[in-house]
Image (cartoon, helix red, strand yellow):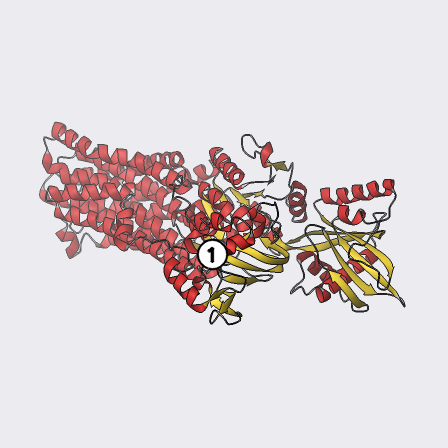
Amino acid sequence: MASETAEGTTLEVLRRLESGPRGLTESEAATRLAAVGENTLPDRRTPSWPRRCAGALRDPFTAVLLCLGLVSAAVASWGTAVVILALVAVSCVLRASGEHRADRSLAALRELVAGTATVLRRPGPSEAPEPREVPVAELVPGDVLRLGPGDLVPADVRLLRARGLTVHQGALTGESAPVAKRAVDDDAPDEHRLCFQGSTVASGGATAVVVATGTGTRFAAAHRVPDAPRAGGAFDRSVHGISWVLIRFMLLTPPLVLMANATLRDRGLETLPFAVAVAVGLTPEMLPVIVTTCLARGATLLARAHAVIVKRLPALHDLGAVDVLCVDKTGTLTQDRPVVDKALGPDGRDDPEVLRWAAVGAWWTLQLAELPAPDALDEALLEAAGAVGEEYDGVDAVPFDPVRRIATAVVRGELGRHTVVVTGAAESVLERCATPPGEHDRLLALTAREADAGLRVLAVATADRAAGARTSDARGLAFRGLVTFRDALAPTAAEALRALADRGVTVKVLTGDHRATAARACRDLGLDPGEVRTAAELADGPGEATVVARCTPEDKARVVTALRAAGHTVGFLGDGVNDVAALRAADVGIAPRSAVGVARESADVVLADKDLTAIGHAITAGRHASGNIASYLRVTLSSNLGNVVAMLGAGLLLPFLPMLPAQVLAQNLCFDAAQLAFAHDRPGTAALRGPAVLRPRSFLRFAVGFGMLNALADLATFAVLALALNGPDAVDEAVFHSAWFTENLLTQAAVMLLLRTGRREGPGRAPGPVGLAAAGLAAVGLLLPPSPLGSALGMTALPAAYYLLPAVVLGVYALALTAARTRQRRRQP
């Protein structure tokens, strides 16, 4: 609808909008505002608390635990049911609260597209229009705006008058260079006479009429990108892979226990609570809680210390697993402004006079052409040349014209003479110079050489004219030379690139710029661009290419998808509508808070600034959280698997259950509570050097190997206790249960200390959270059986003699565990 309104001549557009060059009256604007609504974008609704909690039940472990809890309730095993359902409730609340905090932090970072706009409004039909500032939300179709350098375009507008107008519309189209706009009614496409909401005025000024607001703008259309389900990230793939393998074991355990006890011990449904408890024992019940706590704590610290907001908690783990980071050049590796590289004379050698004359032209163009601010190249010239131009008296100036591609300034020279200074594109300047044909071609070749080196080139020429001579279309100029510009490097980019390389992250630059420009910026930052390829040259992904030039939005998404298909975990940093597809295709989409709304909402992580250093901090935080999750998984999987194998074996050999269901759940609860300390552990430096990938096969191999070692220790304890006991009477059962309960918790405390990946506590250093938690777990194992709570659970105090033989077994187990862990670390690459 907006495009239809903007079609035709300027007069036809104004007639359709029932407006004019003098703008609307206040009453007309108020009537239209009531009819079309405010010029705002629709807010995205955030899920309610019940929806968040229900969403947490999609986690496979949480869902299975809920089923086990309901089964326990169905068979009237109320203690088992209460413990399991409590774990489910805690997991759901922790996950929902973490996501809610992330949404609140993101809402605090939202920014309006623009605060106010300058419009022409009339108090009444016969009164003169007055420029005034109005909130952007109150703009309506037919309003007449004034735009100047630096202004954000607050709605879709059709130009009525424009002078030297260029706009940055990369947020919508991906173009890195400003685009020239003009108001002339000619045969050019209507796009040349339209400016779109979300664009920024780079230079020049304009008067324009609003043709679309709110949901009718092209910017709003980009917000209506369908919420297609994104592919699962590294976290989802790895944790779900581990989960489903364990879930299969869990679902097989109860029927196997029931059948074995019915066959060998003639025990049937009365062993169902024990079978459920054993299945729960195999489950890392606290995995959702530990994961959510680790990620939420890491996200909170990241937001507080570095103003980085993690919108989707699993994205923090995915950040830690990132091994390829795709970025744009402009605004990330470079600043959005040029700086002077060198000034060359016609012979290709350094010539400071060329820079001086270019700066004189820029100075007087700014002073006489009524430009509110210099354009980017003029600003770079004045910064590099210093105080020049004021020694002359300015006579006239014509600003840069995108059609003629030159700017002209005239200054007073000797008595009765003027000096004309012309700057602009080399082809346009040279065609106005008096140069022989061979010299003309040589200078164009010199220009091409500098451009191929990734530099922007500005040609400079001067002429001496009699005062009063026509200078608007000067000819017969003397060619002075070239001024070359390079992109100003982002201050922290070089250091950030080195830090990312040290962390094992490969940076790939996906840019719409020319390949030479992108390669030059990479070399200046110490990043080897290798063989720069264009998007059109890519068949099966970027391969080893560091820089991919001339990328369209579709190309960026295609490259990201190809990298993921090759087995990489990919992060993508983008800030425009043209980056939305790639943001969604990546494992982790990253956007600065200055990004357009649709890009910010499509991203998983929002940065305070578009800075690679912040991404480095986020990756470190992700690896920190992932290292703690990995420690938990190693410890709980190996310990739980060993305990379950030992219990199943003992259950078949003993005439009574090796542990009562309530004792199994109490042991699990104590172990799980102690393992919450892993969320506060400090991983060792080795865990931060490379991508933190939770590989299901690796964890399962680890769990089987160390779990069997744990099962051997448990069965050895069982053998010692069986020899020490006199028979299967009630007292002997209680002593056996108590002794094995104590031995299991002591074993699990040792596993927590010896299998973690965190930093070791050295001599004279205070114990960390895991050390304190392991000590507390050991204390519970020793003190709970003789306590009143132990009696309620069917346990009793142990004679002193019963501590000696299990203590020997525990010591041997600790030595074997240490040796196996040392051997396993040495074999790791």
| Residue 803 visible in the snapshot | no
Percent of width and height locating residue 593: 48, 56
Q: Residue at x 86, y 43 (%)?
A: 439
Q: Is residue 767 left or right of residue 710?
A: right
Judge the density around disc 1: few (<14), some (14-19), many (≥20) Cα neighbours within 10 Å: some
Most foreground residue, 650 or 35: 35
Q: Is residue 127 above or below residue 228?
A: below
Percent of width and height locating residue 750: 34, 47
Q: Is residue 103 above or below residue 824?
A: below
Is label 1 in a helix, a strand or a loop? helix
Most foreground residue, 102 or 199: 199
- Quarter residue 633 falls in: top left
Percent of width and height locating residue 289: 31, 50
Percent of width and height locating residue 459: 77, 51
| Residue 537 visible in the snapshot | yes
Q: Which residue is mark 1?
A: 17
In the orientation shown, which residue stands out farthest toward the right? 415
Q: Is residue 2 left or right of residue 797?
A: right
Q: Is residue 224 left or right of residue 255?
A: right
Q: Is residue 462 left or right of residue 733?
A: right
In the orientation shown, which residue stands out farthest toward the front? 126
Report how many numbered discs are placed on residues in the image.
Answer: 1
Three-letter code for the amino acid on which mark 1 is drawn: Leu
